[in-house]
Structure formats: C-alpha cells, structure tokens
C-alpha cells in the first residue's frame, strides 16, 4: 500500500472518529440537509442530497444538474455504509489499497452496492451507525469532502 493511500485512509478514519452525533432526529436531518443544499447551491454544484435514519429517508433534494442516476448512486452508497459501518469512500479506498473490488466475491452485487465516496455514517456513541448522509453528483473525493465540510460545520454548533 502506498504512503498516499495509507495517509488518505488514516484521514478518513480520523474523520469518522471525530464526526459523531450526540443524537440524531428529524430536526437534525432537516438542518443538515438544508446546510448541504445551501453549500451546494452557493457553489452551483449539480448534486443530490440524502439523509436517512435506519431505513427511513428523512431528507432528499435534487439540485439543478442532478439526475435520477444520482439517486441510484445514493442507494448503492447507502447500502455500503449500512453493510460495513463505514463511509463509502473509506470502504472503497481500503479495497483499492488491497487491489480488491466490491463485488460478488465479497457477497455484494455491484448493481446494488457502490464503494464510491459520498455516503457518510451518522454515528451515535454507545449506539453505532443510526443513519447515513449522502451526496452524489461530483467526483467521489469531492462528494465525500462536501459531506465532511457540512458535518464539521453542523457539529461545531
């Protein structure tokens, strides 16, 4: 594994340790979703934004330039977070570092799972992953970075 891969994986792992919620409810989903929409709108980013708690979708927005294909990517990324209890970007980077793919050999169907950046676990200490916040529409590192930026802003308040 290259130093660059190791450093990126360590950075994402640190983000997941740091960006945790004390609780997560409908009001939090609305506020975080609106924050993401505002950030994306200001930058004219063609993304879809999605927040879930368990299997319930609490927030969804498709911004100008996004398509139904982004919604499909969201579904696939969300499944990765729930399956592996880690961000879709972290799962993808760990696999890439080992020269592996998320496919049938891992018991996953690529039509249903996507280990590409943009879906981040909503974690509550003592409970675990309770939800997922996802962005789709940009290159995977940028999808992930936008979610992390929003989480940092949201959780510092």
Image: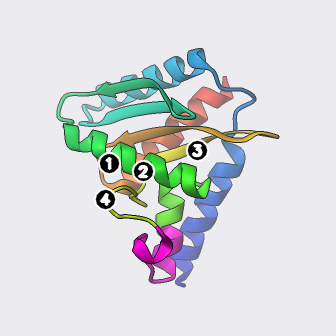
Q: Which residues are magenta?
A: 93-107
The residue at which mark 1 appears reads as 73
Location of mark 2 (residue): 77
Residue 67 left/right relative to 125: left
Question: Mark on residue 55?
Answer: none
Quick one: label 1, few (<14), some, or many (20+) residues within 10 Å?
many
125 in the magenta segment: no
Q: Residue farthest to the right?
A: 126
Residue 118 in sight: no
The answer to whether mark 2 and mark 1 are in CB contact below 8 A is yes
In three-dimensional space, the C-alpha distance between marks 1 and 4, rounded to whole angstroms, equals 10 Å
Q: Quadrant of the C terminus?
A: top right
Image spot of residue 61 (x, y percent): 33, 25
Neighbour class for label 4 at 10 Å: few (<14), some, many (≥20)?
A: few
Residue 43 visible, this angle:
yes
Which quadrant would the N terminus be assigned to in this image? bottom right
């Amino acid at each position: 594994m290259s130093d660059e891969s190791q450093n990126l994986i360590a950075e994402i792992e640190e983000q997941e340790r740091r960006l945790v919620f004390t609780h997560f409810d409908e009001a939090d989903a609305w506020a975080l979703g609106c924050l993401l929409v505002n950030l994306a709108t200001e930058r004219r980013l063609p993304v879809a934004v999605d927040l879930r708690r368990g299997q319930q979708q609490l927030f969804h927005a498709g911004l100008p330039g996004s398509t139904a294909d982004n919604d499909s990517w969201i579904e696939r990324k969300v499944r990765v977070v729930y399956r592996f209890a880690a961000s879709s970007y972290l799962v993808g980077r760990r696999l890439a570092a080992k020269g592996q793919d998320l496919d049938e050999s891992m018991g996953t169907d690529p039509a249903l799972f996507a280990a590409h950046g943009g879906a981040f676990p909503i974690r509550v200490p003592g409970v675990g992953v309770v939800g997922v916040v996802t962005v789709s529409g940009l290159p995977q590192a940028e999808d992930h970075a936008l979610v992390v930026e929003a989480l940092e802003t949201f959780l510092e308040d």
